[in-house]
Image (cartoon, rainbow, N blue to C red):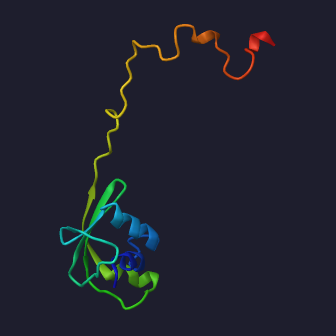
Amino acid sequence: MRLDKFLKVSRLSKRRTMARDLCHNELVFINGTRAKPSRDVHVDDIMEISVRERTIKVRVLAVPERAVGKDMAASLYEVIEIRENPPLDHSDDFECDDSEDVMGSDNAAIPVNGPAPEDL
């Protein structure tokens, strides 16, 4: 079974398109190798899936021939590890020099949207 379909059937991903996007964004690894959505999934494969602030590592226990019910989905894999990812730090992405006035020195006199309230 294709990886994107397995992720959907096992309910590790809500939708197949989301599973495909995870693969294209290099957030899914099988046995330590980046996995494409079309890759075949086999029993005993070790998957690592990174979603938001969490990485889940699972072992594939069964690969169904077709979709299974909600109650059977969790029996397709065994959770090995759940790891919290550190939050992304974007503080270095934007630098602002407070000594430089971007709007100019007389920015209080510039009307933004029509006349100032005191002019009404």
Quadrant containing the N terminus in the rendered view: bottom left
**Residue farthest to the bottom, as pictured:** 65
Residue 117 sits in quarter: top right
Q: Nearer the viewer, residue 66 or 17?
A: 17
User: Where 89 falls versus 116 (above or below)?
Assistant: below
Image coordinates for residue 12, horizontal then vertical, percent? 38, 71
In this rendering, position of residue 68 left or right of residue 37: right
Q: Nearer the viewer, residue 101 or 30?
A: 101
Q: Nearer the viewer, residue 42 or 34?
A: 34
**Residue farthest to the left, as pictured:** 32
Image coordinates for residue 66, horizontal then vertical, percent? 41, 90
Query: Residue at point 45% right, 81% down?
Result: 70
**Residue farthest to the right, as pictured:** 120
Image coordinates for residue 47, horizontal then vertical, percent? 25, 71
User: Where 10 falls versus 97 (above or below)?
Assistant: below
Q: How many marks?
A: 0
Residue 61 sits in quarter: bottom left
Quadrant containing the C terminus in the rendered view: top right
Image coordinates for residue 35, horizontal then vertical, percent? 27, 70
Query: Residue at point 52% right, 8% down?
Result: 105
